[in-house]
Amino acid sequence: MQETAHDQTARPPERAEEPSDISRWLAALAYAFVAAPFVVYEARRRPPDEYLRFHARQGFVLFFVEFVILVASMILEAAIGKLGFLARCSWRPGNCAGAWAPWACR
């Protein structure tokens, strides 16, 4: 006689709880440049919410990368002058009268 274990019933996978409205707003705010550290602080202060913590961590990583790029570009600009690609990307009023895009004029 063959014994089979059918005591485990097939259950649908458990659904995670829907995040609250506050968690959703804070998660969206995590991607704003200067608000990311505030959202990380709020995520630590609140009860465990994996949705909010994931977006807070990801937003802070983006904030850190943007900050490093900003500082590096400021240092490079001060050290070697106006960079060519930055000069083409920057738009100054009166530089390109009638141009549809700042990079369209030379």
Image (cartoon, grey):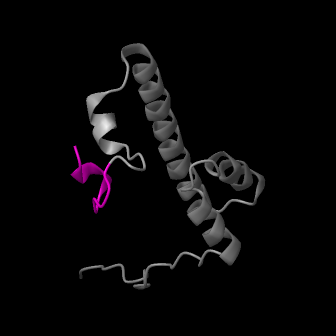
Determine the residue located farthest toward the top in the rendered image. 79
Where 16 falls versus 36 (above or below)?
Answer: below
Left or right of 37 in this view: 70: left
Query: At x 27% / y 30%, what residue is drawn?
Result: 84
Q: Residue 69 colored magenta?
A: no
**Residue at point 61% right, 61% down?**
29
> From what the image shows, is residue 96 above or below residue 23?
above
**Location of residue 70 in the rendering, given as x and y in whole percent from the top left corner:** 47, 34
Magenta segment's dominant SS is loop
Question: 1 above or below 51?
Answer: below
Q: How many marks?
A: 0
Q: Going by the picture, which residue comes out furthest to the right?
A: 45
Residue 95 to residue 84: above or below: below
Taking depth in this image into account, of 27 and 103 the one nearest to the observer is 103
Quadrant including the N terminus: bottom left
Is 45 positioned to the left or the right of 106 in the image?
A: right
Which residues make up the magenta segment?
96-106
At 32% from the left and 43% from the top, the residue drawn is 89
Q: Nearer the viewer, residue 4 or 29?
A: 29
Give the quarter of the image for residue 27. Answer: bottom right
Residue 80 picture quarter: top left
User: In this image, 42 relative to 32: left or right?
Assistant: right
Q: Tell me the quadrant of the picture where the C terminus can be found.
A: top left
Looking at the image, which residue is at 59% across and 61% down? Answer: 50
Residue 34 spot, x, y in % from top left: 63, 47
Asked whether, in this view, residue 5 is left or right of residue 85, the answer is right
